[in-house]
Amino acid sequence: MDHKYNIGSVHPLAISVSANLKDIRKIPVRLKISTGNYILQTHKASFSKNHYISPTCKLCSKADETVEHFILLCEKLEEARIPLLSKILDNGSLILAKVTTSFPIDLIQLIINPFCYVDINANRTGFEETSNILEPLCRQLLYNLHKKRYALLANIDKQGSRKSNF
């Protein structure tokens, strides 16, 4: 679903209904993912001129690290994913059942941009429920995945530097 936002207005992804600084700090991660600027192994590999960089996930080494793999599939991120994903599915099902029935819902798209399924002009209540309930959960999930990923990558880098010192 393609929604138009007024020129000069801020896209709902770039705002927070909370004035809480912790919530506001989570916005850049979501924006990078939604705009394709979040650097995953597949991105690094595609920019590698000599093809020395593998697109394989450094965390699990089981598949290419795509957005889908990062958000839904990497087993090393399960701990950060499971609690919030179940809340997103429960709340998202309830909210989206009220606002749309004519097309399938893409879970990745819902997590990255829950506003894509809610038209502010057609369903103000659905938009507000998305803003107040679903969007904060999605933002928190992406932020938690990001934090866990970078913590695990830092540990991998530390282990690699220790091995090279011997």
Image (tube, rainbow, N blue to C red):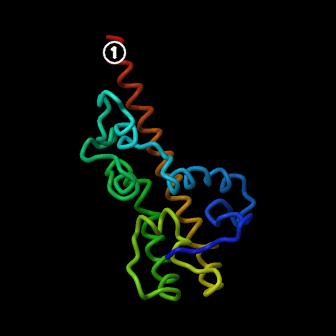
Asked which quadrant contains residue 54, the reply is top left
Residue at (74% x, 64% y) in the render: 8
Q: Secondary structure at mark 1?
A: helix
58 to the left or right of 121:
left
Residue at (39% x, 36% y) in the render: 47
Provide residue 159's location: percent of width, then percent of height. Answer: 36, 25
Tell me the residue that label 1 is attached to: 164
Q: Amino acid at mark 1?
A: Ser
60 to the left or right of 94:
left
Please say if 112 is above or below 44: below
Provide residue 99's location: percent of width, then percent of height. Answer: 52, 86
Q: How many marks?
A: 1
Crowding near the residue tagged with mark 1, few <14, some 14–19, many ≥20 C-alpha atoms within 10 Å = few
Provide residue 92's location: percent of width, then percent of height. Answer: 48, 76
Residue at (59% x, 80% y) in the render: 119
Please say if 48 is above or below 110: above
Residue at (68% x, 63% y) in the render: 16
106 to the left or right of 19:
left
